[in-house]
């Protein structure tokens, strides 16, 4: 879906397949209410044993189903109520309507002997967890029909954020407020062990804007409570569940001759990845009969109810699934409900594991393309899925539509037309007079050419003591080349008020070979640039220079032309090449203007003893084994790998037509990796070593090896893991050899979140340890503790040791953001 409306799509665990179009209309319906108050029983389900069909009732307790003539045993069920079973006779001539009253039930505790040492729930859970692998593999294959209906409604909008929400496509979030949107589908599902699912959407209907394709139907989950994780949370049946959950026994009840135990699930930590609620487990067989679980993820509360039905001896599978969701986050609020009813039409039990459980095969050919889930989950749509008439829907719809849902479908065309008109105005944007001030764009998604202009507001490009204020403009022109490739040309010209000269550059980038991530880049210009390209950011330097009269970046003049190319030679193997020429000369401070005069903070601009020009080439290889990727708009995008990434790079300065060229040969190697150490924590490490080979007497300081540093100011845009927070950006440089290592341990629970009132809050904690060795610097060590908020901001403290003796400490606030094309992006 292209819509910006929150896509609250909750998935269901199904094991299922395909079947024929029904030949009988809905002839069995009814309503389930409580015996005591005659009010609808929310969460009620029915199970029709002969057809292995589950039906979920709506919020009004209503249900309906299609049945061929005959006698059927029907179970009416709901958590907290006694199951009522009856025989229903269906004839060709008459429709059957039943109003069912369920009696509230209590769970019996009087026969249970509770030990002083341990709650009986733990023994039940140990047996259930031990039996989980059996129930994961008890079914060899099956087919099913699945009816799904979902409702969603945005009830509250943040007015300030709403003004920004239409920047991408012209449609603000408020356009969806107080409108009920509905999607319903009817699918056939086929499951083949161990993990292959095939879904065929037979009918699809939606009032959600832009939700026109049957392949965008709310999906079925490829998961189970018997697996370690379910619906993004840690399952109560996880092999290490006792490390994450406490359990409490709350009694038992008789269900068709089986004692079913009610077990309260209590998370040990208030964490969004943990469930709370109840699971109902049968004695002796140790299988789940019902689940009533909730989770809370940073303002999004979900309530899941799963009903299991007996389909064969020792086989209980989900027959109905309901989810109610409420969201209240960042000033936005909304509701979502999801009902799914499942009818199993074919079931093959894996008899070979009844007495012996064998591990799943681990050696299978890997498909690294995450966009092609056909190995595990294949979804197709019938060509008639969106063309089904009302008679067809009347036959297959298990949950009756409410009046509001009927009105939602009736209004869908007018809502879609309104949003399309807003979107067209945005994508076909024309330059307006206000764009002269704020910047703007000509062209958009529907045009081949796009022109961007920074506006008067973007005229102040930078401030530093060498150039003074940099006043000018940056333009960009983009030309689409087919569907996946494009050419970008971005000239940038500005006047330096202190140096009293023009500075300029032009960047050209051509993307090609989209499945090999090809990128050719050309850049040329005349600019003042930093000796250390990995040092403090220009934005940081501008702030400290203008406010505190403290310059942290050292500049030299570079007239240059560069060309570089990178492309995948194979999946995970990238080749990078580059060629650069530059005339380089020293610069000095030309102003020290600041709001607050502090002359002692001013540092003279760095002067290299010998400024040599540059003619150099470079070649690099980067390799990550088993690098998984997705394909977006026909272009490959890498996602993750369980293996380290190795980088090798060689650069050499050589003789050219200029007489004062730098001569050097530099070899650089990196190894970086992130390892998940537990469900809540990970370790990330980075090793870097290298050396300059041969004679280094004729080198420019700009060609030295520099390290990623942030300077000595408390506010930085650098990442606490990758950056030395207390190391000087320039005195640490070397033209000899070096070795550095960085290791970071990131977890939800290190110190603060062990305090009960801090659990569930939006932050993680990390410990950092970094090491650097060069012939001049010897042993430099830096340690830090940081709290990060979704990686958007880090607050912490670092301490450093030089030659194993205490050196310094500092508090840092790190906001690792970039400002690109007028948009802030997380690094």
Image (tube, grey):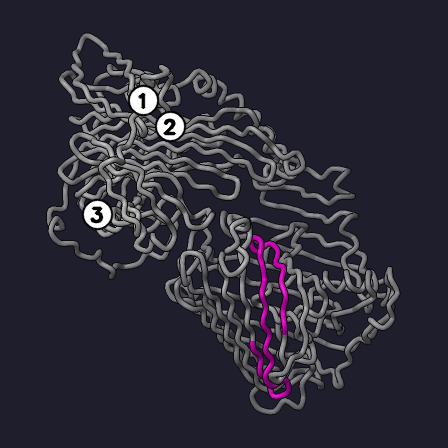
Label 2: how many residues lie within 10 Å, few (<14), some (14-19) or many (20+)? many
- Element type where label 3 sits in the image: loop
> N-terminal of the two: label 2 or label 1?
2
**Real-space Cα separation, disc 3 to disc 1, in angstroms:** 29 Å
The residue lying at 44 percent from left, 56 percent from top is: 680
In the rendered structure, does residue 188 fall within the stretch colored magenta? Answer: no
131 vs 422: above or below: below
The residue lying at 58 percent from left, 44 percent from top is: 448
The residue lying at 53 percent from left, 21 percent from top is: 414
Query: Which residue, given by chain and number where applicable, does mark 3 sit on?
Result: 193
The tag on residue 397 is 1
> N-terminal of the two: label 3 or label 1?
3
Q: Provide the residue span drawn in magenta.
A: 771-799
Quadrant location, the C terminus: bottom right
Can I make out residue 227 in this image?
Answer: no
The tag on residue 149 is 2
């Amino acid at each position: 879906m292209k819509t910006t409306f929150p896509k609250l799509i909750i998935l269901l665990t199904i094991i299922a397949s395909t079947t024929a179009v029904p030949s009988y209309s809905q002839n069995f319906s009814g309503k389930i209410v409580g015996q005591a108050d005659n009010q609808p029983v929310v969460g009620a389900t029915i199970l029709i044993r002969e057809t292995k069909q589950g039906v979920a009732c709506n919020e009004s307790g209503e249900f309906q189903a299609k049945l061929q003539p005959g006698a059927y045993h029907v179970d009416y069920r709901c958590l907290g109520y006694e199951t009522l079973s009856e025989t229903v006779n269906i004839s060709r001539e008459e429709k059957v309507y039943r109003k069912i009253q369920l009696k509230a039930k209590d769970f019996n505790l009087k026969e249970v002997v509770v030990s002083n040492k341990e709650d009986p729930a733990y023994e039940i859970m140990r047996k259930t967890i031990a039996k989980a692998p059996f129930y994961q593999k008890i079914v060899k294959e099956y087919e099913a029909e699945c009816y799904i209906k979902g409702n969603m409604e945005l009830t509250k909008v943040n007015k300030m954020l709403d003004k920004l929400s239409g920047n991408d496509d012209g449609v603000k979030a408020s356009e969806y407020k107080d409108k009920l949107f509905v999607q319903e589908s009817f699918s056939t599902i086929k499951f083949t062990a161990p993990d292959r699912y095939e879904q065929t959407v037979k009918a699809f209907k939606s009032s959600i804007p832009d939700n026109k394709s049957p392949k965008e139907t709310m999906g079925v989950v490829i998961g189970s409570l018997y697996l370690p994780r379910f619906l993004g949370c840690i399952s109560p049946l996880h092999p290490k569940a006792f490390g994450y959950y406490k359990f409490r026994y709350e009694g038992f009840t008789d269900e068709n001759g089986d004692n079913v135990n009610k077990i309260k699930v209590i998370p040990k930590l208030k964490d969004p990845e943990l469930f709370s609620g109840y699971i109902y487990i049968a004695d002796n067989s140790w299988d789940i009969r019902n689940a009533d679980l909730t989770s809370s993820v940073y303002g999004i509360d979900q309530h899941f109810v799963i009903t299991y039905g007996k389909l064969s001896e020792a086989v209980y599978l989900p027959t109905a699934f309901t989810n109610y969701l409420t969201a209240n986050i960042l000033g936005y609020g909304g509701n979502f409900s999801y009902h799914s009813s499942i009818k199993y039409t074919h079931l093959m039990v894996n008899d070979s594991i009844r007495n012996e459980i064998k591990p799943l095969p681990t050696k299978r050919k890997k498909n690294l393309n995450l966009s092609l889930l056909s190995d595990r989950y294949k979804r197709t749509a019938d060509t008639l899925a969106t063309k089904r008439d009302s008679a067809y829907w009347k036959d297959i719809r298990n949950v009756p539509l409410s009046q509001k849902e009927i009105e939602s479908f009736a209004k869908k065309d007018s809502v879609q037309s309104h949003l399309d008109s807003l979107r067209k105005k945005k994508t076909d944007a024309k330059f307006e007079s206000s764009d002269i001030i704020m910047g703007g764009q000509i062209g958009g998604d529907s045009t081949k050419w796009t022109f961007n202009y920074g506006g008067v507001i973007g005229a102040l490009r930078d401030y530093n003591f060498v150039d003074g204020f940099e006043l000018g403009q940056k333009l960009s022109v983009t030309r689409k080349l087919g569907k996946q490739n494009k050419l970008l040309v971005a000239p940038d010209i500005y006047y330096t008020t202190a140096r009293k000269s023009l500075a300029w550059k032009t960047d050209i980038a051509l993307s090609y070979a989209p499945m090999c991530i090809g990128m050719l880049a050309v850049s040329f210009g005349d600019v003042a640039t930093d000796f250390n390209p990995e040092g403090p950011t220009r934005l940081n330097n501008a702030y400290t220079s203008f406010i505190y009269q403290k310059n942290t970046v050292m500049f030299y003049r570079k007239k240059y032309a560069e060309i570089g190319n990178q492309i995948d030679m194979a999946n995970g193997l990238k080749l990078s090449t580059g060629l650069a020429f530059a005339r380089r000369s020293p610069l000095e401070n030309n102003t020290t203007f600041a709001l607050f005069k502090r002359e002692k903070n001013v540092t003279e601009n760095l002067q290299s003893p010998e400024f040599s020009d540059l003619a150099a080439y470079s070649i690099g290889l980067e390799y990550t084994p088993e690098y998984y990727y997705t394909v977006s708009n026909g272009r490959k995008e890498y996602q993750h790998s369980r293996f380290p990434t190795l980088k090798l790079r060689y650069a050499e300065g050589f003789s050219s037509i200029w007489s004062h060229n730098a001569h050097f040969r530099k070899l650089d190697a990196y190894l970086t990796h992130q390892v998940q150490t537990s469900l809540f924590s990970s370790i990330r490490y980075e090793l870097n070593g290298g050396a300059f080979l041969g004679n280094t007497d004729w080198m420019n300081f700009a060609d030295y090896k520099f390290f990623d540093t942030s300077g000595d100011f408390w506010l930085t845009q650098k990442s606490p893991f990758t950056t030395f927070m207390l190391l000087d950006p320039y005195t640490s440089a070397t033209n000899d050899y070096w070795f550095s290592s960085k290791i970071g341990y990131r977890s939800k629970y290190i110190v603060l979140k062990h305090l009960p009132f801090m659990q569930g809050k939006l932050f993680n904690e990390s410990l950092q340890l970094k090491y650097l060795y060069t012939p001049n610097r010897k042993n430099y060590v830096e340690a830090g503790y940081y709290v990060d908020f979704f990686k958007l901001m880090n607050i912490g403290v670092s301490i450093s040791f030089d030659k194993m003796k205490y050196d310094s400490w500092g508090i840092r606030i790190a906001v690792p953001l970039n400002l690109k094309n007028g948009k802030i992006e997380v690094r």
